[in-house]
Amino acid sequence: MVINLEDLEKANAELFARHVKLDLWKKARGLRRSGRMEDILTVAESNVHATGIGRKLVNGRATKDYCVQLFVYRKLPLRLLPRHCILPKEIAALPTDVVVSPPLRPCGPPPVVAECQPQTRPLKPGISTSHFNMQGGSIGCFCKSARPGADPNAVYLLSNNHVLAACNAASKGDDIYQPSCIHCGALADTVAKLADFVPLRFGQANVNNADCAAALLEAGVDWSNVLPGGVTLGTPVAPVVDMKVRKTGARTGTTEGRILSINHRFPMDYITSNGLRTAVFVDQIRIQVRTGKNFALEGDSGAIVYRPHDGRAVGLLFAATEDGNIGVASPLNWLLSEMQLSVAMG
């Protein structure tokens, strides 16, 4: 049977709509954390927390077959589940796969006070940055405007909305620091002004394609898109399952992974000026660590994800599992098009 991506995308969207309900997901938080089976069964309807498209696993090994992946908090005994909570083995004749994985959260600032860091000049991908009123994340890369008539000499620093734009609470023109606030950045460390961001949209009725923002570099601030190892960041390339990738972030440095899922869909909580709010993301890239312990942790938000052998950009990291083994990035092609930017050469 020939399986095409369009059919998988439709099935993925249908299963997400069927099994991931924000009202149930929110109510289940406390009961799920108790770890007691009776509590977990009570919230079995919210066991699925993400879906995606990837390789089907058999005995822990990836096969050549593509499927719709259902990511769950834990596998539950079928004999104890209500009929409507039993996940299908296939949908529209397309295979599914149930994968146990912890939920995702923003790769925001480190959970503890970080050591002070000096300024890094020229600016480069993977060093710390933040809005003047936020703790921090990572510089992704540097871009030029693709808008007609834009200043060809203007350079923009790219990172996440929750790093540079305070989850929509910031104003254009706000100061952006390097190092970040959590690394003792202050007014004298201003390197850019917030220029634009894609607003985060909260609630079940809204979907998000990226968590991103851009800041215009101040005159005289040097920058470089050269990655660790001397490769210069290249033009974006579309993500594909099994692609080997690297990311360079302020917390964990340069790490390696492989793309586990594309068209990844999931809800995620943000701490905002209006309290805890949930955003639903679609068409994201799920990445599993290849070597080492972590692919990404808090403080790595905004890091660029790229192909190791040629530096072609793939995505912008913004989320990870608590254990750091899984990271999620927004496809760079989409967000650059949305923000009318292009990767700067240099």
Image (cartoon, rainbow, N blue to C red):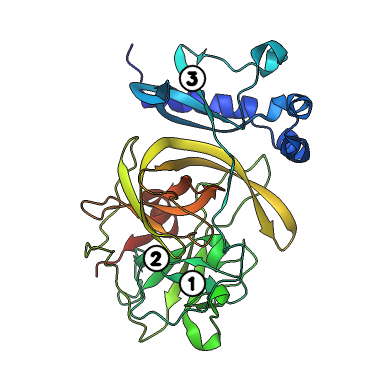
Crowdedness near tag 2: few (<14), some (14–19) or many (≥20) residues, C-alpha within 10 Å: many
Looking at the image, is 70 positioned above or below residue 140?
above
Image location of residue 21, percent across then percent down: 68, 32
Is residue 92 left or right of 240 when viewed as pictured? Answer: right
Q: Which kind of residue does numbered mark 3 sit on?
A: Thr
Is residue 332 left or right of 46 when viewed as pictured? Answer: left
Whole-angstrom CA distance, mark 3 to mark 2, is 36 Å
Whole-angstrom CA distance, mark 1 to mark 2, is 9 Å
Residue bearing mark 1: 129
Q: Which kind of residue does numbered mark 2 sit on?
A: Gly
Q: Quick one: label 3 or label 2, which is nearer the N terminus? A: 3
Looking at the image, is 14 positioned above or below residue 82?
below
Image location of residue 223, percent across then percent down: 32, 76
Residue drawn at point x = 68 percent, y = 57 percent: 271
Crowdedness near tag 1: few (<14), some (14–19) or many (≥20) residues, C-alpha within 10 Å: many
Is residue 131 left or right of 219 when viewed as pictured? Answer: right
Residue 96 disc label? 3
Image quarter hosting the C terminus: bottom left
Q: Nearer the viewer, residue 114 or 160?
A: 114
Assign a secondary structure to mark 1: strand
Residue drawn at point x = 21 percent, y = 65 percent: 230
Residue bearing mark 2: 126
Image location of residue 336, percent across then percent down: 39, 56
Looking at the image, is 119 positioned above or below residue 32?
below
Crowdedness near tag 3: few (<14), some (14–19) or many (≥20) residues, C-alpha within 10 Å: many
Q: Which kind of residue does numbered mark 1 sit on?
A: Thr
Image location of residue 341, percent across then percent down: 37, 62
Whole-angstrom CA distance, mark 1 to mark 3, is 40 Å
Assign a secondary structure to mark 2: loop
Is residue 182 left or right of 331 when viewed as pictured? Answer: right
